[in-house]
Structures are given as C-alpha cells and as structure tokens.
C-alpha cells in the first residue's frame, strides 16, 4: 500500500481516536455524577426503611415508599452500569476504532464508511464508525467490487461498491492496511490465524467470511442446520449471530431469551468473552447433562461421558439396539400414541396423604379424570383434574374453617400469629375476621396438600413410563430382553438413577401427560455439536422451547459417541428450514487439516486454509517408557514456542494413567468433567472434554491399533483437529489402522 495513503488513513485514525478519548473524558464525568447519585439514593433508601413500622397503616405506607425507593436505587444502579459498559466499549474503540472501509455509490451519492465493533457518532451526528451489524455493513462481508445488494429494514437496497479496504489497528496505530476485492482478504486472516491461542475465544468480526455471514445474518428461517467441518467457524458463527440478533431486535429481545446448549463446561468458559468483547451480555448456556439434571431433581441422570466411559468396557449388541430404539423419533411418537389411547384406569394415580391419612384417594382422582370429555388432550384432562382437586381442597378448607375445633384453635392463637394471619385485611365484622383467620389457619395447615397437587404428585410418571414400555416393546429385540430392561429400569429408579436413553422420553411423557415443562419465553435456541444429540433428545428440547427459532451446528465426522445420523428435515417438518454446509477449515495449518482429512472415510470434502506449519509427527514406541520419554521431550520443545498445549486421549482412564506416569517428569494438569476453567500450561484430558476447544499444540496419546480401530475415526479426527499449529501423535505398539491407511506424505513417521 502506498505510504501516502497509509499516512492519510493514519491521520483519520488519530483524529477519530482523539474524539473517542474526549468522549471518554465526558463519560467519566457523567459516571462520577451517576455514582454520586446512586450513593445518595441508597442512603435515602436506608433512612426510609428505618421508619416506625409498628402501626398497620404506617406499614402499608412504608411499603409503598420502600418500593419506590427500591426502584430508584435499581434505576440509578442500572444507569451507572450502562455508562460503565459504554465506557468499556469506547476504551476498546480507542485502541482499534475500525477494521474496514467501504466506498460506495448509491444513485450518484458517493459515501465512505468505516466499520468497527461498535458505532461511534460525533457531536454533529456523523457516523465516524459504523457498527459491523448495521445493515449497510453487510456490504463489507458480502460484496466484491461492483454492484452489491444489502438488506435494510424496508427491503433490499442496491449500491455500487467502489473500494474495500482492510485495517489492522493496534493501540491507535495502523499496523497493516490494504485494498482487496475479496470478501475478506486472506492476508488479514493469515495474520489472525497464525497467532497463538489465548485462554478465551476471540471474536471474528474483522474477518467474517461470506458463508459464515449467511449464518450470522439469517433472519428468515425458523431452523438453521449447519454442517461444518472441524474448524470451519461454526461456534464463532453462533456467537456473532447472537450479537447480530441482539443488535437487530434490541427492543424485543434480550440475552436471557437466548439459550446455547454447549458440549462441556470448559467450552462454556472458553467462549465466555466473545459477546462481552462485542458489547453484549452473554446468552444463557447449559450442557445437556445440566439441563437434564435440573429437570430430574433428586435423580441422577447418566451423562453422555459416563456412558462413553462405560461403553469402553462392554456394549453388547442388544444394549445398542435398545438404545437405538429409545433414541429415535419413533419412540417419542409411540409415547404420543400411548397417551392418546390410554384409559383413565391405566394411568398411575397416586393418592394424596395428609397426616398419614388419605386426603384424596387414587379412585377419586381417577373418577375426576374419567368424567372429562374423552377427546380432550391428555395434558388438558390432567390440568382440569388438577384444578378440580384444588377447588375441592379449597371447599374442604372452607368447611373445616366452620368446625368448632378450628374456631377454638383460633381463640388460642398468640397475638403475633393472629396478626400474621390477618395481614393487611380489613373486615366488616368481628365474625368475618374470625372466619377469615380460621380459613387462613386451615390453608396454612393444608399447604402440604396444595403443594402435592401443584407439583403433580398425584400421578406417578416414572411408573407410567414403565407401563408405557411394557405396552410398547421394541420390534428389534426379544420380548424377554425388553421385559428385563423394564425391570432394570425400575430397580435403577429405586437407587435414584436414570439411564441417558430414558431421560428425554421420560420427560416427554411427563410433560405431555401433565402439560408442564415448556418454556414459552425463550426465543432463540442454539445447539452446538448437534451430532452428539439423539433424535429423541432434539425433539424433546424442541418441545421444551416451543417458541424458539433454532440454530443447530455440528460435524458428522466429529461423532465421538457413534450415534445414528439424525434426519434433520424430518424433525422439523412444517418449519422454514435452511441447511448450510461449511467446507473450509480455518483453525489448523494446511498440514494438519490435510492429515486430519485423510483419517476420514473417502469423500470428505474439506478445504484447508493455506497457512503453513510443520508436518504432523507420529512416534511409535515399544514400551510405555519409550512413549513417556518422547512425550516429555516434545513437551519441553513445544513449551518454548507455544502458549497452550494439550495431551488428548480417547478416554478418562487413559488420561488418568498418563497423568500418573508423567507427574514425575513434567508438570501437567489433569482435567475432569467438573472443571470449568482452563489453567495455563500442559493439560491432559479425554477428547470429549476438549470438544469445541483448540490448542496451539496437541499431543495425541495413545494412537495404537488397539485404542483406535477403524470405527473410531471420528475420535481421532476430532483430536487431530484441536491443534492449531502443531500435532504430535504417540503410539505404544503398532499404530492405528487409521494411520496406516492415511496418505504417508501427510505425516512424518518416527518408529
Ligand atoms: N472468519 C474467521 N476469521 C478469523 N478466524 C476464524 C474465522 N472463522 C473461524 N476462525 C477461527 O477458526 C477457529 C475455529 O473456529 P470455531 O471454533 O468457531 O470452529 P468450529 O467449526 O466450531 O470448530 P469445531 O467443530 O472443530 O469445534 C477459531 O480459532 C476461530 O477464531
């Protein structure tokens, strides 16, 4: 780039940074003022709550005043936090105000726009920087020079793109500037991808690629399904998409209404800084295990990881077949049919007890249910039954309140207890007051019955699920096997345990039967690593969040748990669905990507980004001691060049053993399922805990023929693709057949 142009651009950067810094000074003054205000309001709040509250009238008044004060405090605190957040954004902008420039011609009007992570408007209302999410910024990501289109709230607009310029600006200085005709040029991407990995994932707004942009900016579809090869930017795309959607629906959407299902807890930590770096709050995050645990309070649900470890010991063919059936969409459809046809007598009613005696008998509950119109939905019938029980309870309370023994109890209440029951009520007569207190007393005493009804304790959904299974044996296993399975389910339940394959169907049956479990407020759902979910789990999640638009992302080749392929379109019939494929891999060097692609069955379409690095090395040792020596030497070498290094194994047992052995030679950290943060240094962990993560260098252990048979290609592929710059594979004994069939020119073999 011409030095003269660079100098001109630097002049503008300096001028914009100057204005941003001036704004920061103004904002600081405002913040100081806001802080003072918060303190004042808080002090005032304290004074107000210390007024006399012994008289009932005062109490009501004080309450209103306190509420008002509370609101004032909340508003002052919010004001302050908004200012703080804006200042954080301004500080970032002052370092690097923008990364792109577009020159456009719209019907003869020429304009130059600069694009950054947030807008900056000067005092005369000129946009010195446009937010990357503004409609017009779409041109930067989508357009090559010439005629371009971009979406605006009022429809599609057209412009002529005359110039596209990219910048790398650090601490207010232009490091790099160049013009490009590509969507976003390779040169900048090279620089970004070549750097070392940090503890947190970075945002990619400066270098979003066109196909990623399509995912980020889609607002037309209910369901987006993204199949993307390892390192193609799926996770990055989700996070920028969330930021984009929040910007575009500021009024109607907040981050609490967006939920991301993430593969593990480390991943949640790893991505937690991306949205804050874009000035947005994080969406809600949950792992499947956490989601299920929360819905099965009191029961232990088997996790995918526990099951995977268990499967390493034994997984009989029959168990696999049972699992396949229970994880299919057909199984949930069988639940629907069962509930539709089930007679009231087939439902597992529980009597409700009070002080050791039956309060509502199972018969009475069943009769209520039977009396309802046949063709009502099971959930509606259940809800009406529940309401009827509550009405009957209230009637019983009213009747009891008239009984002499209750009135006598009212008489002997202490003044304090009496006043608590009266609350703020006023009465026409003393009789009315006594009646009111008697009812309140009974209501309090029978609260336990109310709670039992409210929490649906009058039906045993676990027993119902067993009844459903008995009535619906799988066609692919013997009847005796199925019957044994149901008994085992019941025995495990006694020990408060539920198998993973039963979790989603059980919840589905419970929700459909009782009309509960749905969250209507959630608006967007994102499921990363979708290949780890069964059809039944996905259908259940979809049912649990009925108003959500869903984005599913995954890679069928990173299938660690050997699931059946889910037929996406059939799960979402009737909804506007779009499928997108990402083939280009950005994370790893060309050498690592090409090696990893060679591990997959033929036909995988993976394009490597052209970033050069050393070839992957495969070391074959005879004994464990040989392997430990190589690992130690490699770690010492890698630590000189890189920041993050991980030793990845197939399972936790291998990680545990290796950690024990290595401890004597080199400092490492062993990671487990419950870890939430990524410490510095060398980590040892099974690959399923490293899903979605990346490291500067990866050592794969132990890539032997016994640990990695051909069927485990997904595991080895996932391990290899966690490496950004260097990949070392260590095998004790003969190497995996996967390496034997990989192209020999893609790696160095040290035998
Ligand atoms: N457009 C881009 N600009 C800069 N970096 C990018 C871009 N796209 C992807 N990357 C980088 O590539 C790496 C992989 O991205 P990401 O983790 O989002 O991919 P993924 O498809 O979710 O990967 P996987 O399925 O293997 O976990 C990250 O370091 C990310 O920052």
Image (cartoon, grey):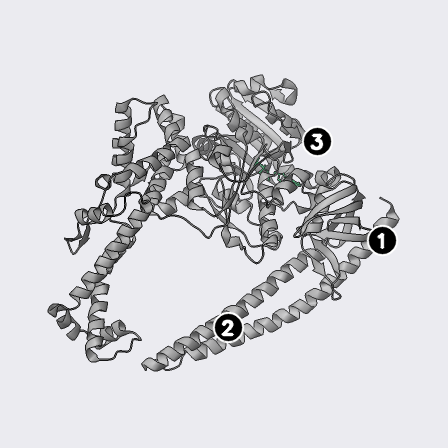
Residue 479 lies, with reference to residue 376, above or below; the image says above
**Residue at image location 44% in from the left, 73% down from the top:** 67
Return the disc, 3 or 1, that comes first in the chain's sequence: 1
Callout 2 touching callout 1 (CB < 8 Å): no
Q: Position of residue 488 (x, y in %)?
A: 27, 32
Q: Identify the image quadrant of the C terminus.
A: top right
Residue marked by disc 3: 612
Q: Viewer-nearest of labels 2 and 1?
A: 2
Q: Position of residue 199 (x, y in %)?
A: 58, 45
The alpha-carbon separation of the residues under discs 2 and 1 comes to 49 Å
> Which quarter of the figure has residue 321?
top left
Residue 616 lies, with reference to residue 455, above or below; the image says above
Q: Position of residue 93 (x, y in %)?
A: 69, 56
Residue marked by disc 2: 72
Q: Is residue 649 visible?
A: yes
> Which quarter of the figure has residue 331?
top left
Residue marked by disc 1: 8
Give the structural element (helix, strand or loop) at label 1. Answer: helix
Q: Viewer-nearest of labels 3 and 1?
A: 1
* Crowdedness near tag 3: few (<14), some (14–19) or many (≥20) residues, C-alpha within 10 Å: some
Q: Is residue 414 visible?
A: no
Name the quarter showing ligand 1.
Answer: top right
């Amino acid at each position: 780039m011409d030095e003269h142009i660079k100098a001109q651009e630097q002049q503008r950067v300096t001028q914009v940074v100057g204005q941003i810094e001036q704004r920061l000074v103004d904002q600081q003054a405002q913040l100081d003022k806001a802080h003072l205000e918060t303190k004042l309001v808080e002090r005032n709040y304290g004074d107000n709550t210390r007024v006399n509250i012994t008289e009932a009238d005062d109490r009501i008044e004080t309450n209103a005043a306190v509420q008002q004060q509370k609101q004032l405090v909340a508003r002052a605190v919010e004001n302050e936090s908004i200012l703080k957040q804006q200042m954080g954004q301004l500080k970032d902008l002052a370092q690097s105000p923008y990364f792109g420039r577009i020159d456009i011609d719209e019907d003869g009007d020429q304009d130059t726009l600069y694009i950054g992570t947030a807008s900056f408007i000067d005092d005369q209302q000129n946009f010195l920087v446009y937010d990357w999410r503004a409609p017009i910024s779409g041109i930067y990501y989508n357009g090559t020079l010439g005629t371009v289109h971009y979406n605006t709230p009022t429809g599609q607009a057209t412009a002529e793109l005359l110039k596209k310029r990219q910048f790398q600006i650090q601490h207010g200085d232009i490091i790099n500037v160049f013009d490009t005709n590509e969507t976003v040029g390779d040169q900048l991407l090279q620089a970004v991808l070549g750097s070392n990995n940090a503890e947190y994932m970075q945002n990619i707004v400066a270098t979003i690629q066109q196909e990623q942009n399509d995912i980020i900016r889609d607002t037309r579809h209910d369901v987006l399904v993204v199949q993307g090869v390892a390192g193609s930017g799926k996770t990055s795309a989700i996070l920028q998409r969330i930021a984009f959607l929040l910007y575009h629906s500021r009024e109607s959407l907040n981050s609490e209404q967006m939920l991301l299902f993430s593969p593990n807890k480390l991943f949640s930590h790893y991505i937690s800084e991306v949205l804050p770096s874009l000035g947005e709050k994080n969406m809600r995050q949950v792992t499947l295990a956490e989601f299920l645990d929360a819905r099965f309070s009191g029961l232990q649900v088997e996790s995918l990881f526990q099951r995977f470890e268990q499967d390493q010991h034994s997984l009989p063919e029959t168990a696999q077949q049972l699992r396949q059936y229970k994880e299919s969409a057909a199984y949930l459809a069988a639940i629907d049919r069962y509930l539709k046809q089930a007679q009231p007598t087939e439902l597992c009613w529980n009597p409700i007890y009070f002080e050791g005696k039956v309060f509502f008998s199972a018969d009475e509950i069943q009769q209520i249910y039977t009396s309802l119109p046949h063709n009502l939905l099971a959930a509606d019938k259940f809800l009406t039954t529940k309401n009827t029980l509550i009405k009957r309870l209230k009637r019983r309370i009213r009747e009891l309140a008239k009984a002499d023994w209750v009135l006598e109890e009212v008489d002997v209440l202490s003044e304090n207890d009496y006043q608590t029951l009266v609350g703020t009520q006023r009465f026409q007569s003393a009789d009315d007051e006594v009646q009111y207190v008697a009812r309140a007393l009974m209501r309090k005493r029978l609260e336990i019955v109310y709670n039992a009804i409210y929490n649906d304790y009058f039906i045993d959904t676990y027993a119902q699920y067993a009844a459903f299974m008995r009535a619906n044996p799988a066609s692919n296993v013997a009847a005796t096997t199925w019957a044994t399975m149901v008994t085992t389910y019941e025995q495990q339940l006694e020990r408060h345990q539920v198998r993973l394959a039963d979790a989603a169907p059980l919840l589905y049956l419970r929700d459909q039967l009782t009309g509960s479990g749905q969250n209507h407020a959630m608006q967007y759902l994102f499921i990363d690593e979708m290949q780890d979910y069964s059809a039944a789990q996905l259908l259940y999640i979809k049912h649990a969040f009925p108003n959500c638009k869903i984005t599913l992302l995954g890679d069928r080749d990173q299938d660690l748990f050997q699931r059946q392929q889910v037929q996406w379109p059939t799960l979402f019939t009737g909804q506007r669905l779009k499928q997108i494929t990402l083939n280009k891999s950005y994370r790893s060097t060309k050498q690592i990507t090409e090696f990893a692609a060679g591990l997959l069955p033929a036909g995988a379409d993976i394009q490597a980004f052209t970033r050069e690095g050393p070839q992957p090395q495969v070391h074959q040792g005879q004994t464990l001691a040989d392997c430990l020596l190589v690992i130690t030497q490699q770690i010492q070498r890698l630590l000189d060049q890189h920041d993050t290094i991980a030793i990845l194994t197939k399972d936790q047992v291998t990680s545990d053993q290796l950690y024990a052995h290595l401890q004597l030679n080199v400092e490492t950290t062993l990671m487990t399922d419950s870890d939430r943060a990524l410490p510095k240094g060398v980590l040892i962990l099974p690959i399923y805990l490293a899903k979605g993560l990346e490291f500067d260098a990866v050592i794969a252990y132990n890539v032997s023929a016994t640990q990695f048979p051909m069927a485990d290609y997904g595991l080895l592929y996932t391990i290899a693709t966690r490496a950004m710059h260097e990949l070392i594979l260590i095998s004790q004994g003969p190497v995996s057949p996967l390496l034997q069939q990989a192209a020999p020119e893609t790696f160095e073999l040290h035998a």
